Amino acid sequence: MAAPRAAAAASAKQVTRRNFAEAVRELGAHLESCDYVAVAAQKTGAPTGWRRALPVDTAETAYLKAKLAAESFQPLQIAVCPFLLRNSSPSTLVAYPYNFHIFPRDELQLGMPSYSFSCQSSYLSTMANDGFDFNMCIYDGISYLSRVQESFARQKVFTPHLRPLLPSQSTSVADSVFKSRIKSRIMHWRKGYAEPNKKDDGSLVSSLSRLILGGETYGSRPSISIDVCSDHQVQLVLEAANHISDDLVPLVVPDKAGAARAVCVIFTSSKEDKNLLLMDIQQSNEEKFRGFREVIDLLSSSQKPIVSYNCLNDLTMMHSKFVAPLPPNMHEFMCSLKMVFSNVVDVSHLWRQIGPLRKAKNIQAALSYLQRQYFVPIEIKIPEQDGTSGVTKNEQNVLRITKLFAKLSNLLKIGPECQLKSGEQYAAVEEYCNVFYPSCMVEDSDDVDFANERDTAKAVSTDNIVFLWGFRGKSVKELKSYLPGLHQIFSEDFEVKLLDKTCSALIFRNSDTAMQLLKEISSESPSLNSFFSEGLKAAGFEVYRKVCRLGLWDLDLAEALEGVSSEVAASTLSECNSSQIYWNSSLMLDLKEYLEC
C-alpha cells in the first residue's frame, strides 16, 4: 500500500465512466476493511423560500419538501469516503475518498433515467467558480438506472444471451431434416478452424470457403450465424451444436421485439478460452445496465453505517435516483430506506448531543467550535490513490464530515459496536442512527462565531403555531407591536417570524391560546372585527400540513394557505394530530432575502 499523505493536501480519486469499473473494485476492497462510509452530494440546486425546510416543519412536512428537491434537482457529483477510525490518543482516521461524476445519460434509448432536471444559476455559478468541470460531467459522467428502472429496462432491452438446452423431445421428419442440415453446416464451418489446412497456399481459397459457409466473428473469435423462425428451431440448433463439440458456444440473438431471430455459434480455442467467453458475455450484458447504482448496491451490501450531513435531503435524492420513486410519506420512506441502508448517522444529530453545538449552523461552524473548546486530536491519513486531482468542494465536504464524525464520536464515546476501551463503555453507533432533523442549517455561511449567541432552540408543539398572512408588507417588529391592539388574545406571550414575504408564523407559549384564536377566527367572532378589517387571515398547522401534502409549491405560502383553509372545517381543529418541532428562531428567514431574490 502506498504511503499515506497529509490530509491538507489530500484529494479524492476522481471517477468517471472511463475508470468506473476499476474504482468499483477498489471501493469494494476498502469497504471491507473500513468501519464507516461518509457520503456527500453536489446538486444543481435546492428549494428556496418556504419550500425549503423551516423550523416550523415536522419530520413529515420536511420530508415532503426533501421529496420535492430530490425530484426536481440532479446530483452531478457524489463523494463516497470509506474510513477506519481507531479511538486511541490521538485518534487515527484512515480515509479513502472517491468523487464520482454522474450524469443522467439515456444510454439505452428508453427515456430513462431523465431528459430534464432543474438548475439554479447561483448553484452553477458557484460550482464553476470552484472549478467544476461541466464538460467532464456531461461527456464522461457515469450514467445510472434505479433498481426499478433497471427492472423495466431488462424487459425492454434485448441482448444476446445464453439459453439452457431443454430435454430432447420427439421430433418430426421435418425437424430431423432441419437438424441434420444445420449440424452438417456447423461441422463443415468448424472444421476450417479446428483442423486448419497445413498448406500455406490456400489462404484465398480458405477465405472464400469461410465466406460461403457464413463465417463471421464474435469479437476476435470465429462465429457463424444461423437464422431461425421460432423458439422450436432455436432448440434444434442448440441440440445440433451441443452434439458436435464442447468448444462451441451458441448464443441466441433476439430482434427488437425480443423474439429470437438467429443463433450465433462461436468457436473457442480451449476450455479456458470458452470460460473467458462466457464471462465476457455475462459482463457485456451487465454493462448495458451498469451505472452509479452499482456503488449504492456496494454500500448497501457492506452494511457499514452511512455518515452524512443534511441526511434527509441527501438520502431522499439517493432513493429517488438510484432505488425507486419516493413514497408519499415519511414512514414509508424510512421503511424503504432501511432496506437499502440499515444505519444512517446524521452528524447534525450527533452535535446536538453537545449543548453549545445546538447553535451551530453548518459543519465548519461545528468544527471551529470543537477546535476552540475541546482537545480532540485527530490524525488523518489518506493513502495515495491513482486518478486524483485538485480538491473539489464536494470532497472537501465529505472529508469535513469524516473529521467531524471522528471528533464527535470521540467526545460521545461512540464505537462501531459496543466495546470496552480503557475501562470505559463505548456506546454502539446504532443508538444514534436513523434520526433525521429537518435541515434548517445555513450550509454556505462562514459565520462560525456563535459562542455568545442566545440558545433559542426548544421543543414546541404544532398546536402552538398559527400562520398569519395579509399583513401588507409590515415588518416583524411592526407586527409584534401592531397585533396586541387588534385583540386581547395577542397580549399573551408569542413570537413572530417570517416564513416568506407573504406569511409569518406566530408561536404562542400556550397552545390553548393558539386554539382559542383559531376557533374565534373560524366562527368570525365580532371580537375580531378589527383583525378582519385589516385584511388579516390565519390558519392552524393542519392547513399548512395539507398544503405540503397537496404539493402546492408553485404558490406563495399565503395563497396556498388561503386556498386550503376554507376546506378545513373548524370542527376538525380538536381532531388535528399534534406533533413536535425543533424550533430555533435564530434560523428563521429574513424578509431582505426575499426582496433580493
Image (cartoon, helix red, strand yellow):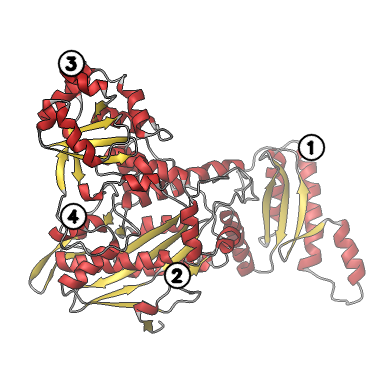
Residue at (88, 57) in percent of width and height: 212
Residue at (42, 55) in percent of width and height: 297
Q: Nearer the viewer, residue 557 or 102?
A: 557
Q: How crowded is mark 3: few (under 14 residues within 10 Å), some or many (20 or more)?
A: few
Give the residue pinned by disc 1: 174
Is 153 drawn above or below residue 451 in the view shown?
above
Q: Residues within 10 Å of mark 1 (few under 14, many from 20)?
A: few
Give the residue pinned by disc 3: 525
Give the mark, 3 or 4, whose residue is nearer the N terminus: 4
- Asked if one can make out residue 57 in the rendered structure from this viewpoint, the answer is no
Q: Which of marks 3 and 2 is in front?
A: 3
Give the residue pinned by disc 2: 26
Is 269 drawn above or below residue 494 in the view shown?
below
SS under mark 4: helix
Give the mark, 1 or 2, whose residue is nearer the N terminus: 2
Q: Quadrant of residue 37?
A: bottom left
- Asked if one can make out residue 338 in the rendered structure from this viewpoint, the answer is yes
Q: What residue type is labelled 2?
A: Glu
Q: Position of residue 13 (x, y in %)?
A: 46, 71
In this rendering, position of residue 77 left or right of residue 223? left
Q: What residue type is labelled 1?
A: Ala
Q: Distance between the residues labelled 3 and 2?
A: 70 Å
Residue at (81, 48) in percent of width and height: 181
How many numbered marks, from 0 up? 4
Q: Which of 274 and 85 is in front in this view?
A: 85
Q: Nearer the viewer, mark 4 or mark 2?
A: 4
Q: Where is residue 266 in the image (x, y as percent from the top left)?
A: 71, 59
Give the mark, 4 or 1, whose residue is nearer the N terminus: 1
Give the residue pinned by disc 4: 431
Q: Position of residue 452 (x, y in %)?
A: 15, 61
Q: Where is residue 348 in the image (x, y as percent from the top left)?
A: 25, 56
